[in-house]
């Protein structure tokens, strides 16, 4: 995806042209986040309506034009109770892995 290099220097002032590019990129990002949130709300509401329509019509599968909608049960995900394992004397450190490093971008405030 991108490189893992994170510069050590923390310089708050950028050349004017770079600052203009950064301001625009942050603005585009903020608009995209707002659109994504709105789209997620709309999708969640549509999902709820679709589920209700299927349930109200006592069906788990239906075709409408070129689309299909179906309901099915999904098995719950298995997890380990780390607290219980630690309480029983299991050393969790022996079984802990660290993932591949990545770079995190943090953008706060509005432009």
Image (spheres, rainbow, N blue to C red):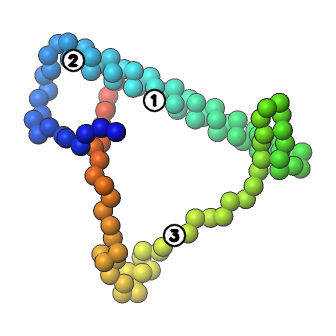
- Local secondary structure at mark 2: helix
- The answer for how far apart the CA atoms under marks 2 and 3 are is 46 Å
Q: What is the number of the mark on residue 13?
A: none
Q: Which residue is mark 2?
A: 19
**Is 41 left, or right, of 4 in this rendering?**
right
Residue at position x 34%, y 39% from top? 1
Q: What is the number of the mark on residue 33?
A: 1
- Local secondary structure at mark 3: loop
- The answer for how far apart the CA atoms under marks 3 and 1 are is 31 Å
Q: Determine whether 19 is above or below 34 in the image.
A: above
- Local secondary structure at mark 1: helix
**Is 40 left, or right, of 103 in this rendering?**
right
Q: Determine whether 29 is above or below 56 in the image.
A: above
Residue positioned most to the right:
57
**Splitting the image into 4 quarters, where does residue 99 fall?**
bottom left
- Give how far across and how far down residue 21 sits, in percent: 27, 16
- Give how far across and how far down residue 30 sits, in percent: 40, 25
Quarter placement of the C terminus: top left
Is disc 2 in contact with disc 3, using a CB cutoff of under 8 Å? no
- Give how far across and how far down residue 16 sits, in percent: 17, 13
Residue at position x 51%, y 26% from top? 35
Q: Which residue is mark 3?
A: 79
The residue closer to the viewer here, 100 or 72, is 100
The disc, 2 or 3, on the residue closer to the chain's N-terminal end is: 2
Q: Residues within 10 Å of mark 1 (few under 14, many from 20)?
A: few
Q: Residues within 10 Å of mark 3 (few under 14, many from 20)?
A: few
């Amino acid at each position: 995806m991108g490189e893992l290099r994170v510069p050590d220097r923390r310089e708050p002032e950028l050349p004017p042209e770079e600052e203009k590019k950064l301001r625009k990129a942050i603005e585009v990002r903020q608009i995209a986040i707002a659109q994504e949130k709105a789209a997620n709300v709309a999708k969640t509401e549509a999902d709820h309506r679709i589920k209700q329509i299927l349930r109200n019509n006592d069906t788990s599968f239906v075709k409408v034009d070129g689309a299909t909608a179906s309901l099915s049960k999904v098995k719950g995900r298995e997890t380990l109770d780390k607290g219980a394992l630690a309480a029983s004397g299991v050393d969790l450190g022996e079984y802990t892995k660290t993932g591949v490093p990545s770079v995190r971008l943090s953008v706060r405030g509005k432009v």
